[in-house]
């Protein structure tokens, strides 16, 4: 992904010493300070404050200043201008200011697009991929063959209030009639912008370049039409970059300029404000490219969950617009069903009470769990949000190539029913991000949530974004890639450890897997682990060990074929090494009492939670 | 930090209420600045475009799109009736004629020589918006609407269903912690806004719809009953357009929670008065809370648009309400606002405040888990 084009003067990266970066999320604004310390770039201080896009403030910069002020108080460095009109720049005084200020944003529901194309699985899908890659939420995709009648499409487009529309359709020199019909439909719908404000809706045309005159004639007067090169110039290749860059430009020019306080924020920053998911996508691709690995990333937020994957160099991003931990938490309940959430709750709970708690989180989205019971419920919901968003990602990330990649004619026609590009057995690293994962009180809780939601197979490393700084580093990489990479490696990723699990048909009881290795202190481990267990060993990231895994059931596979042993080198992390013999898919007992007992056994095996009730103050009641 | 900002719900007997009344699209504003308006007065009107029906007439006639124009008997801008002939081919010796008719009464929007598509637009739908509250117009947005200002009582709820309703307030139970059941809903409540206590059962809501109650204001409601009422779940708190049969406003949250005593007594004091209520809720960007407004029609709020004071933030001594377990729904006051984060039962670190609850319990609560009870009077 390329950085968005900017109207800001370019930052001289050689003069950078200290950068303040903020991410204005839908719930909180996170500020971090990145500094050159002893010649190396490090993330040093962090602060956060509620996002203030909404009433009564309706000015995003209030939250930015509050977050920056918290960093200032912690670091002992003045960061906010005395008049509150921006972030202080360095003027030679070593205790004041920063050399640059940058920001990402997903507040106010993020960037919302409607996309269109002639064929749903071809040009419309290419348009969708361009929009998602730019960090947008795709509200709807329409196409000549989307099974809706034209008047239904028009009604739907009228109801939606997107930030912009991306219209593709036809390869260059291909169909004229169908593309023009789409434009005529759009004109008839007279779509309006989400934020109003008296400006014309931006429509980006990225379809058949031979019909741009027709498109301009039909749509030119009713909208702010931008023509960019075709996202699908020929059947067998895509060109997503120009459309994506134009989306970023318009995000700055139109959407950001209309959101409360963003006109000020845009003047404060030294690089274009990026949509948060676009910035996270940049960093995910960097990880995969630099390490030469397959990566699955997730950013679970209050309103949405983004999933990113890079398999064999192919990047895909999906956004589940209504799966999140606060604003959309009731939708997780609606989509997953109560029983799927309850299956992860390691104690008995009244169902009506649980529904009410989830409803109350939806209407008071900024609250946090105060009791252990509340935390466990929140983490149960998170498992289901992660799982559902991952299912959507796997369905989308089928045989679809990234930017400028070639595909054969045969591939191009094989658009439906393909296998997902996401192959769990080829996955090297899972990176979790977002409040519920990055801020879990114990890191092992994050590892369990991701293991339960993704069910990694064979040998997979698991990491979290330490304090949710991937968006910040993504936008930093647009002005100083080396600094972003350095901070990413040293401060951002926290390796939790390695998850090991066999695939294949598994008996519910009896020995499943033999594990043999020598710990760094020389202690030998040789254990047979029964089905339905989680087993954890402490092992640091710096220690690499050689492990031999031997299936004890003939149909179980750890990567060498059914029943065959495998020896591999693995590293640990802050959690260590976790062997999972719960089966794939994970088997949970149906009976509630037995399920609760099993969940408690797993919780204890990993040391997931404290005893509770050890708060420092007197007078706190039990939940 | 001496004060923090924690958004709260307004429960104010005397304030200035401003209502932005805007058309869904450009139209005509029927009032002017300074004009006194009653809640039911129309302040702006427009016509929403009718449904659009694209029909490929070239295909119907079996002609090339480029030749469609010569076969059209109606042109762009012409009015048509449903079933009226709009295009025809002459056929051959009077035989094999093809004809096309209008699918809807309306006008012809466009005729495409490229696709052969003719777009019919149904007749527009007139839309009017009223003042919603009795007051004075303090601002006019040309072609869009106006702002009406009035002095009065404002109670914000936390969640609602259904849209705007104007009716007389009436009590259904006599205390803030009484459950409202079907038996509490009486025929004389038809057309009224009924104020409840702690919780309304789904049977009470259904009975209220049967009786013809215009609106209900209660402390709590079970989240899973929404599906029983609406037939679908509300997954994201963006509401207002539900066809429930009445407007429901929940002041505290989901579950059996008593209405805050101050809210109940304030609403009780307005029984018999005409109120304007709206269940529309939007928790995300551009937050909208459901509300009960009772204007004080004897008081002139002036024609200068009132500017609300900046929220002052939360300070020691202020009243707060717990909004998450284990203190959900409990009222108290702030004892201390320590700067240092504390370790919670969950082992998370969070910035906290010390609160003395009304039952005398003193506890430390994450700042994120309380909201201010905003009672400051304004404008008078």
Image: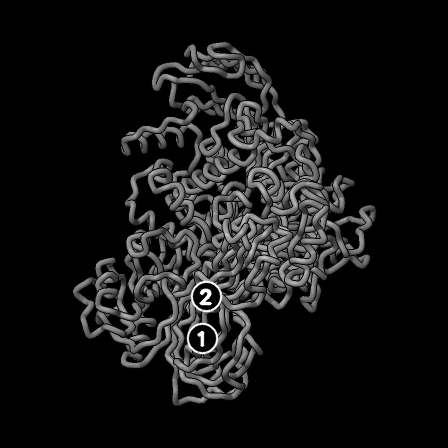
**Tag on residue B128?**
1
- In the rendered image, the residue lying farthest to the front is B93
Q: Which residue is pictured at 38% across the width and 46% down the height?
A: A334
Task: Place residue B2 in its image quadrant.
Answer: bottom right
- Within 10 Å of disc 1 (Cα), the crowding (few <14, some 14-19, many 20+) is some
Task: Place residue B135 in its image quadrant.
Answer: bottom left
**Tag on residue B363?**
none
Q: Do the numbered discs 2 and 1 sit on residues whose CB atoms are within 8 Å?
A: no
Do the residues at discs 2 and 1 belong to one chain? Answer: yes
Please give left or right for residue B162 compared with residue A189 in the image. Answer: left
**Colour approach in the figure:** one colour
For mark 2, what is the residue? B81
Percent coordinates x, y for residue A46 in the rendering: 62, 50
Q: Which residue is pictured at 57% across the width and 66% down the height?
A: A58
Percent coordinates x, y for residue B138 in the rendering: 52, 83
B71 vs A475: above or below:
below
- Within 10 Å of disc 2 (Cα), the crowding (few <14, some 14-19, many 20+) is some
A155 vs B271: above or below:
above
Please give left or right for residue B152 compared with residue B100 in the image. Answer: left
Instruction: Please tell me which residue lies in front, A226 or B270.
Output: A226
């Amino acid at each position: 992904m390329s950085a968005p084009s900017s109207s800001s003067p370019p930052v001289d990266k050689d003069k950078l010493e200290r950068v303040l970066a903020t991410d204005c999320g839908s719930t909180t604004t996170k500020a971090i300070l990145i500094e050159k310390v002893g010649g190396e770039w490090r993330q040093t201080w962090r602060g956060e404050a509620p996002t203030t896009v909404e009433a009564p403030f309706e000015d995003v910069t209030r939250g930015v200043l509050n977050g920056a002020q918290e960093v200032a108080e912690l670091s002992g460095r003045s960061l906010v201008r005395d008049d509150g009109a921006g972030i202080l720049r360095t003027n030679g005084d070593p205790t004041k200011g920063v050399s640059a200020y940058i920001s990402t944003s997903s507040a106010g529901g993020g960037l919302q697009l409607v996309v269109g194309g002639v064929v749903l699985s071809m040009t419309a899908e290419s348009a969708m991929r361009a929009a998602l890659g730019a960090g947008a939420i795709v509200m709807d995709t329409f196409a000549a063959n989307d099974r809706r009648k034209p008047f239904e499409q028009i009604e739907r487009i009228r109801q939606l209030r997107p930030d912009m529309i991306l219209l593709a359709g036809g390869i260059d020199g291909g169909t004229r009639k169908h593309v023009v019909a789409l434009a005529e439909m759009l004109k008839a719908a007279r779509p309006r912008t989400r934020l109003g404000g008296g400006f014309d809706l931006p429509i980006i045309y990225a379809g058949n370049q031979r019909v741009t005159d027709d498109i301009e004639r039909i749509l030119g007067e009713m909208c702010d039409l931008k023509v960019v090169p075709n996202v699908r110039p020929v059947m067998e290749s895509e060109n997503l970059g120009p459309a994506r860059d134009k989306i970023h430009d318009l995000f700055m020019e139109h959407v950001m300029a209309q959101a409360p306080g963003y006109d000020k924020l845009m003047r404060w920053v030294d690089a274009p404000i990026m949509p948060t998911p676009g910035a996270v996508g940049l960093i995910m691709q960097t990880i995969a490219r630099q390490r030469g690995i397959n990566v699955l990333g997730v950013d679970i937020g209050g309103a949405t969950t983004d999933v990113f994957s890079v398999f064999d160099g192919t990047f895909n991003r999906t956004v589940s617009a209504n799966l999140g931990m606060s604003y959309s938490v009731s939708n997780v309940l609606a989509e997953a069903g109560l029983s799927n959430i309850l299956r992860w709750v390691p104690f008995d709970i009244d169902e009506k009470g649980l529904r009410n708690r989830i409803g109350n989180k939806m209407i008071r989205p900024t609250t946090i769990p105060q009791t252990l019971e509340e935390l466990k419920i929140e983490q149960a919901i998170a498992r289901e949000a992660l799982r559902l968003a991952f299912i959507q990602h796997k369905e989308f990330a089928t045989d679809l190539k990234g930017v400028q990649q070639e595909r054969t004619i045969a591939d191009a026609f094989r658009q439906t029913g393909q296998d997902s590009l996401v192959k769990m057995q080829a996955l090297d690293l899972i990176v979790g991000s977002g409040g519920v994962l990055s801020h879990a009180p114990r890191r092992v809780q994050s590892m369990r949530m991701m293991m339960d939601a993704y069910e990694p197979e064979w040998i997979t490393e698991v990491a979290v974004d330490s304090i949710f700084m991937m968006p910040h580093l993504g936008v930093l990489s647009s002005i100083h890639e080396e600094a972003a990479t350095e901070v990413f490696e040293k401060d951002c990723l926290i390796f939790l450890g390695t998850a090991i699990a066999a695939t294949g048909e598994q008996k519910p009881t009896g020995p499943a897997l033999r594990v043999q290795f020598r710990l760094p202190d020389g202690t030998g481990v040789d254990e047979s682990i029964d089905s339905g267990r989680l087993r954890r060993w402490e092992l640091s990231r710096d220690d690499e060990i050689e492990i031999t895994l031997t299936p004890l059931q003939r149909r179980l596979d750890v990567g060498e074929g059914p029943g065959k042993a495998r020896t591999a080198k693995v590293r640990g992390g802050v959690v260590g090494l976790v062997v999972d013999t719960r089966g794939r898919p994970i088997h949970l007992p149906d009976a509630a009492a037995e399920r609760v007992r099993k969940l408690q056994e797993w919780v204890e095996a990993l040391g997931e939670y404290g005893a509770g009730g050890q708060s420092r103050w007197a007078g706190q009641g039990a939940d | 930090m001496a004060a923090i900002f924690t958004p709260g719900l307004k429960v104010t007997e005397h304030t200035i209420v401003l209502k932005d009344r805007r058309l869904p699209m450009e139209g005509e504003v029927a009032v002017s600045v300074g004009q006194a308006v009653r809640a039911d007065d129309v302040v702006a009107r427009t016509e929403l475009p009718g449904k659009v029906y694209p029909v490929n007439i070239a295909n119907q006639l079996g002609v090339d799109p480029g030749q469609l124009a010569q076969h059209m008997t109606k042109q762009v801008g012409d009015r048509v009736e449903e079933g009226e002939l709009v295009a025809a081919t002459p056929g051959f010796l009077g035989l094999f004629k093809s004809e096309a008719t209008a699918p809807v009464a309306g006008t012809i929007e466009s005729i495409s020589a490229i696709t052969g598509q003719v777009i019919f637009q149904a007749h527009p739908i007139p839309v009017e918006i009223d003042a919603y509250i009795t007051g004075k117009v303090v601002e006019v947005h040309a072609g869009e609407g106006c702002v009406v200002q009035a002095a009065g009582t404002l109670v914000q709820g936390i969640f609602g269903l259904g849209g705007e309703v104007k009716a007389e307030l009436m009590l259904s139970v006599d205390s803030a912690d009484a459950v409202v059941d079907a038996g509490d809903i009486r025929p004389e409540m038809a057309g009224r806004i009924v104020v409840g206590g702690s919780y309304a059962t789904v049977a009470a809501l259904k009975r209220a719809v049967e009786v013809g109650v215009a609106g209900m204001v209660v402390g709590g409601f079970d989240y899973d009953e929404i599906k029983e009422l609406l037939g679908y779940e509300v997954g994201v708190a963006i509401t207002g357009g539900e066809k429930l049969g009445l407007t429901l406003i929940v002041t505290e949250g989901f579950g059996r929670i008593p209405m805050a005593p101050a809210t109940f007594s304030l609403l009780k004091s307005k029984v018999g008065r005409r109120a304007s209520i709206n269940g529309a809720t939007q928790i995300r960007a551009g937050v909208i809370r459901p509300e009960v407004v009772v204007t004080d029609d004897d008081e002139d709020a002036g024609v200068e648009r009132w500017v609300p004071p900046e929220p002052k933030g939360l300070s020691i001594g202020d009243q707060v309400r717990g909004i998450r377990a284990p203190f959900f729904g409990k009222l108290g006051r702030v004892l201390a606002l320590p700067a240092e984060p504390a370790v919670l039962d969950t082992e998370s670190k969070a910035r906290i405040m010390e609160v003395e609850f009304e039952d005398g319990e003193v506890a430390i609560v994450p700042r994120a888990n309380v909201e201010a009870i905003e009672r400051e009077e304004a404008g008078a």
